[in-house]
Image (cartoon, grey):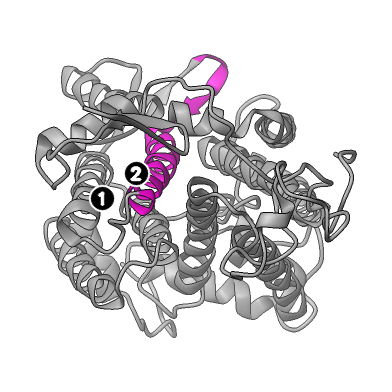
Amino acid sequence: MARFSVGGFQGRRTSERGSSPAGFWNYVRESLKVTNDRFVEQRKHRPDRLIFILILSLLLISVVVLWSIAPARAAVLGGENAEFNFIAKQIGMVALGIVLFFIASRMPLDFWRRWAGRFLIIAFALSFLLAIFGVMGLPIASCTNGACRWYDLPFGLSFQPAEFLKFGMMLFVAGFLALRIKRGEEGSVLRTVVPVVVMMLLALFVIVFLENDLGSGVALIGIVLCQLVIAKTSWKVIGALLALVVVIGLVAVVVAPHRIERMLSFGADCVVIDPESKDWHICQALTALGSGGFMGRGLGHSVQAFGWLPEAVNDSIFAILGETFGFLGVVAILVIFIALLYRIIKTADYIDNDFLRIAVAGVFGWIATHVAVNVGAMTGVIPLTGITLPFLSLGGSSLLFVMVASGIVYNVSRYTSHRKTNDKKGGADESFGGRRRLGRTRDAGSGGL
């Protein structure tokens, strides 16, 4: 049997290429091997610094706003040094996130490809272990209403394996689709789409049904769908997947009473509400946005942060931003997000490597889904769903993993080509082996951050 190498993945040409479990798990096994193939053919140049500038802007806004509402949160939380502990945690998480961003931006790009399978296996193992620890009643598992989402760690810290699982799925699906593209099988439903959907369904079972986290499940779906789209999956297949997603969503709602209440609160009449009402959360979010007006109430003048708005520093942070900065402020924040997403997808357009292009598309889907669902829920456009706002919500596992993912995009932006990768006239003259007929690439030079 002849051996072959595709983008660093090595395997054997056999008749076992279909959607059989053996063929799929053969890819899983082979993806764990380390190879020395040249991974990126483009010359290194300066990264897209605007990506980091936009992310840093969002992080600074987060620190400033959370600092301004720290007294209010301290009054709600109580305890000695509550205000200091609250803001110190956020500053510490932002600092750690920036460190992880730059570590990820300096890691060899083939590291992420080689470790994709390992990351996914570890993420699944941690998720299942959390469920087992919860059933056993061990204190390390943080459980609420029978759902265990976090590991309780020392010093008041926690770890949410769902975020790790999203990260692992993003890298693993990128590697799997890249290999199928090299084999010319990206259009095959059985050999390409079905294995991806099976892995996505397994991850959704863990996140949505074991950990009771529908918001993270929606984000995972957004990641995988964006990766399938950029891998040129048929729109008919994408449509069928969206129909499947709707069915899964309905099942997830029906089996959870609290989700049914959230659906019933959609379009609530907020004239007269009771703190025990199912409409309380969304009505307080709309009240916060409305009280901000056009220019906002200003820093340190938030009312909703005093316990009126549930999850004010996490899932509901957009409402606090609207109360603080008003309509003008939240529009400016959304413009920053749109600019960041544009730079990310532009990086995917100009990278001549299937794995990296699909991975960057996954990061795009990750951030875009979080922003769209969070803002839509807080403004009453879609039913209320718990999901963080990237870079702005109180720091934790979500912030750290999205910073690592963003660091990968920043690193990829060092190897973009002069022309779009789908431009048949471009790409070859940007490789190490080609002549420099175009001279330096855009953003040429290996310096920079």
Secondary structure beneath label 2 = helix
Checking the image for residue 205, the label placed there is none
Circle 2 residue: 176
The question of residue 163 being in magenta is answered with yes
In terms of depth relative to the viewer, which is nearer, 155 or 395? 395
Left or right of residue 212: residue 75: right
Left or right of residue 442: residue 275: left
Marks 2 & 1, CB-CB < 8 Å contact: yes
**193 w.r.t. 63: above or below:** below
In terms of depth relative to the viewer, which is nearer, 193 or 400? 193
* Residue 303: x %, y % from top left: 66, 62
Examine the residues drawn in magenta and state their main secondary structure: helix
**24 w.r.t. 273: above or below:** above
Tell me the magenta residue range.
154-182
Quadrant of the image for the C terminus?
top right
Q: Residue type at mark 2: give it.
A: Phe
In terms of depth relative to the viewer, which is nearer, 269 or 408? 408
Circle 1 residue: 196
Residue lying at 70% horizontally and 36% vertically, measured from the top left: 105
